[in-house]
Image: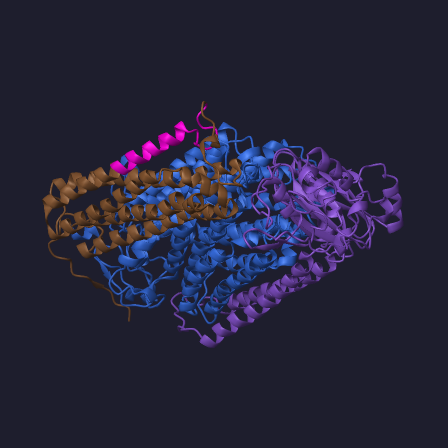
Amino acid sequence: MKAFETFETPSAARVNYINAEYGLKSWLLTRDHKRIALLYLGSISFFFFIGGLYAMFIRLELLTPQGDLLASTTYNKVFTQHGIIMIFFFLIPSIPATLGNFLVPLMIGAKDLAFPRINLLSWYIYLLGGIITIYALLAGGVDTGWTFYAPYSTTFSNSYVIAAGLGIFVSGFSSILTGLNFIVTIHTMRAPGMTWFRLPLFIWAHYATSLVMILGTPVVAITILLLAFERVAHVGIFDPAAGGDPVLFQHLFWFYSHPAVYIMVLPSMGVVSELIANFSRKNIFGYKFVAFSSLAIAVFGFLVWGHHLFVASQSVYAGMIFSFLSFAVAIPSAIKVFNWTATLYKGSISYDTPMLYALGFIGLFTVGGMTGLFLAALAVDVHVSDTYFIVAHFHYIMVGGALFGYLGGLHYWWPKISGRMYPEGWGRFSALVIFVGFNLTFLPQFVAGYLGMPRRYHAYPPEFQVFNVLSSAGASILGVGFLIPMIYLVWSMRYGKLAEANPWHLPGLEWRTASPPPTENFLATPVVTWEAYEFAPVEEMRVIGKFRDEEV
Amino acid sequence: MQTSWLPFIPESASTVSGKVDALYFYLSGVTLFFSLLIGGVITFFVIKYRRRLPNEIPRPIAGSHKLEILWSVIPFIIAMSMFAWGAQIYFQNSRPPKNANEVYVVGKQWMWKIQHSTGQREINELHVPIGRKIKLIMTSEDTIHDFFIPAFRIKADVLPGKYTMQWFEATKPGTYHLFCAEYCGMNHSGMIGSIIVMQPTEFDSWLSGNVNQQSPAVAGQQLFQSLGCVSCHGANGEGGRGPTLAGLFGGKVFLNNNQTLTADESYIRESIENPAAKVVNGFNPIMPTFQGQVTPEQLIQIISYIKSLQISNPQSTTPAAPAAKAAPASQTGATPAPNKQ
Amino acid sequence: MAESHIATEHAASHPALQHHFENMEQQREAGALGMWVFLVTEIMFFGGMFLAYTLYRTKFPLEFASASNHLSLAMGTINTGVLIFSSFTMAFAVYSAQTGKQRAQVVSLVLTILLGLTFLGIKAVEYYDKYRDSLIPGRLFPGRPFNPAGVHLLPGADPRHVEMFYWIYFAMTGMHAVHMIIGVGVLSVITFFAARGRYGPEYHNPVEITGLYWHFVDIIWIFLFPLLYLLGRHLEHGG
C-alpha cells in the first residue's frame, strides 16, 4: 500500500539535538530538556545497576535459611541500601525525569520546559544527592531499612544515617523542581489548539505525579532533616527517651512515602495508556475517566498513609477510616484497568515489544493492586504486615507496575530518543524473560508471607526455604532479563536501523517531528487540530515545519 | 512446626485465625477471579483483534458512561464488603476481654522477656493453655519491636515509652513460632521464640513447677515502698497528699482541666513518668517525675501492684495471688475512685 | 481530518524574552505560576514542623508556656514590625517597577534588604542570648549542654520537656532565617539589575516573583511569632 510507505527519510544525518553540539561542556551545561533527559537516563541506569547488585546479594543470602553468606550487619545494610537506591534514586526519577523530561514538551508542542535552567539544576541536585548517598555507602553503609524508623535510626543505629538521610533530602529537591517544571509547563506552554482534553494521557499522568511530588516531597524532606538534627544534637521529637513520639515519625514519613508509590506508578500508567491506545490504533476508551482517575489517585493517595500503621498502636477508629479510604483509592485504579482492556476491543493490535510490556503491566498491576486490598483489609493486614506478603505486593507494584511501564516506554520512544530502532526480536525475547523471571521471583513470596515469614530477616526457619529457593531462581532469570535490554539498547545507539520520524505511524505530536528531534523540537509552532489518539492514514499525520538542512 | 491442612496456610491455632483465613480465602477468590477475567479478556482481544493489515485503522469508540458506572460501582461494592468484613474482625479483636489472663512482655534488642501475672518468667518462650483468654501487655526497653504469632494471626508493635496490647485464645496444643516483625537492628532475625500451647491441666502443672518466683504485683509493692510512693499515696494506696490509688484502675478519673478519662496502663505510666501531664482534680502537681529511675519492667510491676489494690477491703489488701488462683484478673469489680472536689 | 498548520511567528520580541517562550505574557505567567507552586511546597515543608509543634504543645502545655515566656517578647515584637514594614517596601518596589519609577524601585529594594538584615541581626542577638543561657538544645556546644535552670517554670512544668520547646523553636525560626538569608541574597541580585535599569513596565517578572517569595517568608513569621512568643503569657500573669 502506497499510503503507508515512509514519507520521511531517516533523519539521523540531519542536525538534531544530539549532534547539534559536541563536547562534554555542551552536555554538562545544556538547557535542552532532551539532553537533560539523557543525563538522567545515564545516571538512573547506574543506580539501577547498583540497586540490582544489592538485590542479587539479598537473594543469594536467602537461598539457605542459616544466614551464612553475609554477616547479619552486612545483610541489614544490603537490604537497606537496595531500598534506598531503588526507591529514591531509580524508581522516583525513572519515568518523570527521563521519559517525562524528554516528552512533556514534545507532546504538548512546546520548545522546552518552562524553566530550562531549573531543569538542569534538578539533575545536578539529583547527582549531588546521589554522591552523598554513595559516600554513605562507601564510608560504611546504613542499616536502618529504607524507612528510617525512629528511635532505631535516631539512637540505636551505628551507621551512616545522617549522610544517607542527607542524600535523600537533597535528591528530594530535584523531584520537587521536576514536578514544579511540569506543572507550569503543562499549564502555560501548550501549543495552540492543544486543549486540556486533547492532551495525551501521559501528560495527565505526569500532571498528577507532579502534584504528588510538590505536595509530598517537602514533608519527607523536613522529616529526614529533623531526624538528622536529632542524631547530631541528641535531642528530639521522635525519640521517646526525650519525650518524643516515634509514631509521629511514621506518620510524617508515610505521608510522603505512600504517595511516593504513586509517583512511581502514575507515570507508568500514563505510559501504558499511550501504549495500549497506540499499539491497538484506538482512541482510549473513556478518555476522561482515565485522565481524572490519575488526579483522583494523586489526591486520595494523600489520605491513606495510616494503613502503614495498622499494627503500630494507631487507634482502632483511625485504622478503620484509613482502611476505608484505602479501599476507595482502589476504585480509580480499577477504572483504568477496565478502560485499558476495553480499548483493545475491536482494535488493530500489534505485538511489538512496548505492547508486550504494556500487556504485562496490566496483568501484574492487577495482581499487585488486588493484593493491595489484602493489606487494606484490617484483619488480614494484622497478619501479613511486615511479612514477605508486603514485599511481594510492593514489588508487583514497583517492578511489575513502575518498571514494566518504564521499559515499555523506553522501547516505544527509543526511536525518537536515539534516532535508531532497537532489535525487535531481542526486545520481545527479553520482555518474555523478564515477565517469567519476575513472577517466579515474587509469586512465592506471597505464600511465604502468609505463612508468616517476616521481612528483613537475615536467617529464617527452614520451612520457608522452598519459597526462597524459587524466589532466588526467579531473580537470576530476572537479572539476565534486565541485562539483555541494557546491552542491545546501547548497541542500537550505534548499530541499530535508522528510525523514521514516525516509525509506528501515530498521531501524537512527538511523532510529527524528526527522530531525533531538533534542539527546538519543532521548527515552527505546531497548531493542534486533532483529538488525542485520532488515527489517520499516515500521510495525513504530517511532520510540522521543515528541517534545517532543507531550508539551507 | 506442624503443617496445616492446606499447604499455603499456616497452622490455625487461635479463635481468630479461622476468621482471618476465611476473609483471606474470600480476598484470594476475588483476586483470582478478576485476574483471570482480565487476563482472559485481554488474551482473547489480543488474539481476535490482532493487526491483520499494516494500514488498517479501526473505527474509534468513544466510551460508555454506562460501562464506566458499572465498573466503578461493582468494584466499589466488592471493596466495601472486604472493608466491612476486615474491619469487623479487627474491631472485635481490638478490645481485650475483661476476664483475660495478663502476661507482661518486654522487648529488648534482641530478646523477649515475658512474665506471667503469677510471677513466672520466661525468655523467648511463652507457655499458654488452650481455652483461656490471654492478654499481652507489651512495652520495649529500646527500639520498636513487634510481637508476631503467625499461627494465631496476631501482631502488634511493641513501642518504647508506651504500652500496647493484644490478646488471643489458643485452640490447639503445639509449639508455634514467635517472630519480631519490626526491624530492630543487628540480630532482628534472631529475636524469635516459641509459643507453647498446652492443655490446661498440663499448663497448671507447668505453672506449679515454676512457682517460686515473685509475682509482679508483690515486686511492685516493694518498689512502692522503696521509691517512697507510700508517703503521699498511703501504705495501701488509700491516698493522702496524692490521689487515692486503690480501685483506681479501670475507673474514671476527673482531671483539673475538667476532662475525664479512664485509668489504664498508659495513664498510670504517664502519671509516673510525667506527673504534670494529667493532674487529678483537687490536687496540686507536686509529684516529682520518676522517668529514668524505674526500668520498664519495674513500671510494669508497679502498675500491676496498683491494679491489685482494691477499694472494698483496704486493710487486707494483699497482692500476692497464689498461682492456682491465677485466672480472671481481679479488677473487674473495681468501682471508680472517689475524687476530692 | 488531521491537518496541521504553522503558527505565524510573533513579531519583534522583547530582549528579555527567553527563546522557548512565545511571548512576554506567557513568560510572565509561567514565572508567577512557578513561584506559587514553589510556595505550596514551602507550606508543606513548614507544615511538618507546625504539626510537630501542635502535637508537643498539646502534650507539654506548661513546659511550652514556661519556655515561651523566657523568649524576649520585645525583640520578637520589634522583629515582627521590621518584617511587616519590609513587606511594605517590597510591595512598593514591585509597584515602582510596574510603573517605571526606577529610582523609587531601587531605593525600596535597598530598604527591603536593610530591613531583612535588621531582622537577621536581632535574631542573631536572640540566638546568642539563648547560647549564653545554655538553652541551645542537646549537646551541640561542648561547654554548654542544654540546661533549663534559667527558665522560670510554671507550677507543674517538668524541666526535662522544656528542651522540646527550644528544639522546635530553633528548628522553626532557624528554617525561617535560612529562608530570609536566601531572600536577601536574591534581593541583592535583583537590586543590582534594577540599578542598571533592567526592569520596567514591560518586564518586571523577577521583581514580582521575588516579592511573592518575600511576602511568603513574612507570613511564615506572622504565624511563628504568636505561636512561639505569645503562648502562655497569660498563665504567668493571671496566676
Q: According to the image, what is the colour scheme of the structure? A: by chain
Between B233 and A395, the residue placed more toward the observer is B233
Residue A225 visible in rendering: no
Q: Answer left or right for B72 relative to A99.
A: right
Color used for chain B?
purple
Q: Position of residue B297 (x, y in %)?
A: 70, 38
In the image, which lettered chain appears brown? C
Q: Position of residue B62 (x, y in %)?
A: 40, 73
Q: Which corner quadrant of the image does residue B59 belong to? A: bottom left
Q: Which corner quadrant of the image does residue C228 belong to? A: top left
Q: Is residue B36 magenta?
A: no
Between C133 and B37, the residue placed more toward the observer is C133
Between A322 and A349, the residue placed more toward the observer is A322
Color used for chain A?
blue
Please name the residue shown 45% across and 55% down the image. A268
Identify the residue at the far top of this view: C143
Between A281 and C6, the residue placed more toward the observer is C6
Residue A314 visible in rendering: yes
Q: Is A140 located above or below residue A335 in the figure?
A: above
> Which stretch is magenta?
C118-142
Image quadrant in which the N terminus of chain A is located: bottom left
Q: Answer left or right for C172 relative to C95.
A: right
Q: Main secondary structure of the magenta part?
A: helix
Q: Position of residue B38 (x, y in %)?
A: 56, 66
